């Protein structure tokens, strides 16, 4: 049964739609904080009926009545990905929760065991409000503008994309046709994707960074003459400056960075002023050191999230994202009053660790490569990938666009890249730069920027 046939449910979602999206502009910082306080108390009350959280809070001597707002968040124990996985299925939702009426959504498991969690329809609708906030910030009309979303539809009913397609679009289809939306599978051949996008002519193009780069390469070659998006939304992978500039030049469009996860929904997005705003009224973000202590603004730490709306599987002080970032104490002139994430550096497991203990998170690794490309004034490189085979052995794979190979001497370019990284990493590290297609690990649908084959304990030893 479509839940929107229930007038009470329909009115509840309508209220969310009318209030949630614009809240970041309408409320000042103090008002948003008071909103967070109220939301957190509701979430903790809900979570106390969830076996995993109930047991952890009871062991810590914490009762929902002890939590009065965000200042008390630190009283709560941290929750790991392994704990959520081990507690599945009955331990991650309240007793009596109707799992058959919810959507079971999971992560890919490319970094280990996959996590599965439950999202009910109300949860999905509220989560969607965080995404619609991006549209509002850029003046995109979700009801009228053509939008192409290239997502992971490989496993029906278990990916976020399928969940949104069925749980959101499916239930709203009697109200809105969604003819202005085009959902495409990210694993499809890039030329086929381009042909479909060309016939659709979207104003907004959404996709994984690597897929967008592949489309941008085709666009540079003259494919997709009708593909002229005003905005391109990159998500799911690290967006480095070389890739951003390449995509922007290819499509002559603004590229915005979005930080979204299965566990937290749309956590943060880049506003028109270029600042990464946290959807703090939907998801609270802490940045902690390896001891679980909050770091100072501007300092790097591990992202810990708390979802501020109940329903399905609660996510409270969750450490499982394993992403590195820092927070900013500055304010933005865009009109939103939400906090700013200063640097989003990527996943801890993907960081490059050197013998001397230096660590390079994913977002910082491409810089010397970009310098070499700029020196030769070429855009012949379509994709690059770093594979750390050992702590002193790094392979850099580079894919060359044959149509642009003549723009620069490829051998000299690759040698320049090698020298730049040898200078950065030091002579103790063997650097090999080769022309070779990027590797796609099992469980992934796109090639990651960094593949680390070293022991994860080594990464943890030096990084947070």
Image (cartoon, grey):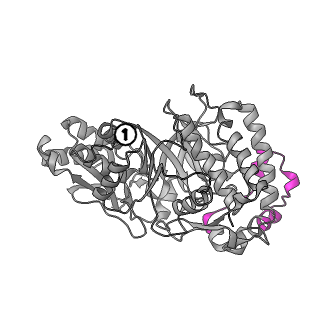
Disc 1 residue crowd, few under 14, some 14–19, many 20+, Cα 10 Å: some
The residue nearer to you, when weighing 262 against 73, is: 262
| x, y percent for residue 33 | 74, 37
| x, y percent for residue 46 | 79, 59
Q: Quadrant of residue 118?
A: bottom right
| x, y percent for residue 267 | 59, 47
Q: Quadrant of residue 56?
A: bottom right
The residue nearer to you, when weighing 210 against 456, is: 210
Residue at the spot 37% in from the left edge and 45% down from the top edge: 201
Number of marks present in the image shown: 1
Span highlighted in magenta in the image: 54-82
In this figure, which residue is indicated by the disc labeled 1? 241
Q: Inspect the magenta stretch and tell me whether residue 81 lies in it.
A: yes
Tell me if I can see residue 284 in this picture: yes
SS under mark 1: helix
The residue nearer to you, when weighing 410 against 35, is: 35
> Residue at the right extreme?
65
Q: Inspect the magenta stretch and tell me whether residue 86 lies in it.
A: no
């Amino acid at each position: 049964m479509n839940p929107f046939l229930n007038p009470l449910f329909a009115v509840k979602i309508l209220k969310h739609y009318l209030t949630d999206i614009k809240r970041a502009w309408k409320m000042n910082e103090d008002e948003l904080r008071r909103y967070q306080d109220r939301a957190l108390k509701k979430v903790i009350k809900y979570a106390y009926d969830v076996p995993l959280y109930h047991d952890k809070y009871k062991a810590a001597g914490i009762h929902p009545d002890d939590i009065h707002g965000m200042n008390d968040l630190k009283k709560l124990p941290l929750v790991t990905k392994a704990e959520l996985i081990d507690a599945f299925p009955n331990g991650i939702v309240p007793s009596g929760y109707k799992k058959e009426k919810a959507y079971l959504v999971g992560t890919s498991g490319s970094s280990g065991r996959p996590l599965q969690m439950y999202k009910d329809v109300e949860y999905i609708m509220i989560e969607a409000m965080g995404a619609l906030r991006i549209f509002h910030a850029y003046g995109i009309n979700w009801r009228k503008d053509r939008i192409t979303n290239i997502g992971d539809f490989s496993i029906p009913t278990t990916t976020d994309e399928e969940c949104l397609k069925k749980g959101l679009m499916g239930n709203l289809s009697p109200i809105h046709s969604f003819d202005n939306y085009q959902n495409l599978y990210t694993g499809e051949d890039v030329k086929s994707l381009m042909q479909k996008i060309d016939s659709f002519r979207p104003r907004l193009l959404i996709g994984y960074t690597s897929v967008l780069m592949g489309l941008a390469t085709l666009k540079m070659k003259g494919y997709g003459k009708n593909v002229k998006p005003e905005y391109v939304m990159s998500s799911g992978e690290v967006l480095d400056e070389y890739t951003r500039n390449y995509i922007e030049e290819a499509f002559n469009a603004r590229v915005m960075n979005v930080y979204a996860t299965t566990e937290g929904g749309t956590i943060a997005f880049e506003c028109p002023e270029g600042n990464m705003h946290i959807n703090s009224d939907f998801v609270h973000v802490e940045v902690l050191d390896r001891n679980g202590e909050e770091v100072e603004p501007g300092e790097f730490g591990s992202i810990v999230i708390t979802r501020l709306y109940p329903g399905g599987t609660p996510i409270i002080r969750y450490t499982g994202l394993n992403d590195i970032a820092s927070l900013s104490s500055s304010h933005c002139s865009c009109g939103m009053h939400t906090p700013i994430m200063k640097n989003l550096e990527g996943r801890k497991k993907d960081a490059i660790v050197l013998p001397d203990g230096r660590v390079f998170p994913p977002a910082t690794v491409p810089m010397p490569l970009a310098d070499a490309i700029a020196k030769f004034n070429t855009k012949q490189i379509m994709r690059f990938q770093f594979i750390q085979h050992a702590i002193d052995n790094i392979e850099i794979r580079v894919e060359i666009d044959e149509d642009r190979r003549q723009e620069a001497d490829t051998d000299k370019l690759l040698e320049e890249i090698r020298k730049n990284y040898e200078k950065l990493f030091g002579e103790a590290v063997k650097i090999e730069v080769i022309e070779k297609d990027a590797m796609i690990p099992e469980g992934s649908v796109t090639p990651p920027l960094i593949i680390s084959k070293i022991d994860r304990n080594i990464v943890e030893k030096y990084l947070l």
